[in-house]
Amino acid sequence: MGKVSKRRSSGSVLLSRNRSSAVPSVKPPTSLSSKAGRTLIRNHHTLQKQLAQAVARNDTEAAQKLRHEIEASGGLEKYQNASIHGQSSQRGGDSSKLLIQWLNEDKAAARGKGSLKLLEVGSLSPNNAVSKYPLFTVTRIDLHSQHPCIETQDFMERPLPTSEDQKFDLISLSLVLNYVPDPADRGEMLRRTTQYLRTLNTEDPLFPSLFLVLPAPCVTNSRYLNEKRLGEMMESLGYTLVKRKLSPKLIYGLWRLNNLVLAQKKTKWKKEEVNAGKTRNNFAVTFK
């Protein structure tokens, strides 16, 4: 999807690529308590949102101050270390475990080893559950890679496919969309996923599809978004929800792309209040 906005230069999205049979090991991140990790991640998201707002109103002084504050707190690298630590098997934080569970329920592995292509956007580790699943050949991308098996790349700048061979059967956006600070850019990211998925196979009940994971409060306690509205937005892109789980912390969805023509229509979605209340958060997704 071309360049969405120059706001992204301040650092926002996430990505990943390339798989090798022998995955090199890297030094694990410094030990961090679960509470401290959540606090760091939450603060980083807040600062990124404030930075995007400052850039949008052309407040260069405030933007520069916020960039210094982000760097002083450890920047994207420390944020990712906290995310990796939270994803560790000891804490049960690998969201792709549920994806594998869903695939096994539908006997997806019967398709054969390496028969499907997966693009993992915002990849933190080449050792998560989906990377070990024999069905997939995995391409991993991240905005700030910390592993040689993960390509440093912004999904929003990734070249669009020019053939079916360059497309994927599955795209993973796990805790990525919520990191994008601007509602319109979130919508553009979702719309862009449709351009990387292969042509629909009417006989396949699962693929091509998008694995989307968000913090639960994005749909349970947002002033501007709930599950119903998110579903309507996804359906306007041609997606149909085939698997879903809501936990106290996360909302998981496997969305099958059924109608690419709908995505090409570029339906617009404005920022509208769907849940009133002073305690609601302001997470939103819009489509221009």
Image: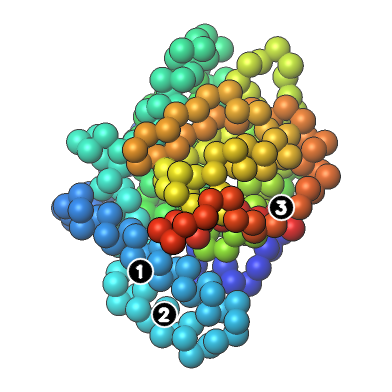
Q: Cα distance, mark 3 to mark 1? A: 32 Å
Q: Which residue is mark 3?
A: 269
- Quarter of the picture containing the N terminus is bottom right
Q: Residue at x 82, y 36 (%)?
A: 261
Mark 3 secondary-structure assignment: loop
The one of 213 and 11 positioned closer to us in this rendering: 213
Q: Nearer the viewer, residue 248 or 261?
A: 248
Earlier-in-chain disc, 2 versus 3: 2
How crowded is the residue under tag 2: few (<14 C-alpha within 10 Å), some, or many (20+)?
Answer: some
Residue visible at 46% across and 73% down? 50
Label 2 is placed on what type of residue?
Leu
How far separated are the C-alphas under marks 2 and 3?
30 Å
Q: Which residue is mark 2?
A: 66
Q: Residue at x 60, y 38 (%)?
A: 228
Are dots 2 and 1 in contact, CB under 8 Å?
no
Discs 2/3, front = 3
- The amino acid type, in three-letter code, at marker 1 is Gly
Residue linked to disc 1 = 75
Q: Amino acid at mark 3?
A: Trp
Q: Position of residue 121 (x, y in %)?
A: 51, 45
- Pinpoint residue 29: horizontal percent, then vertical percent: 23, 53
Q: Residues within 10 Å of mark 1 (few under 14, many from 20)?
A: some
Q: Is residue 209 visible?
A: yes
Residue visible at 40% across and 40% down in the picture: 250
Along the viewing direction, whichever of 193 and 275 lies nearer the viewer: 275
The mark nearer the N terminus, 3 or 1, is 1
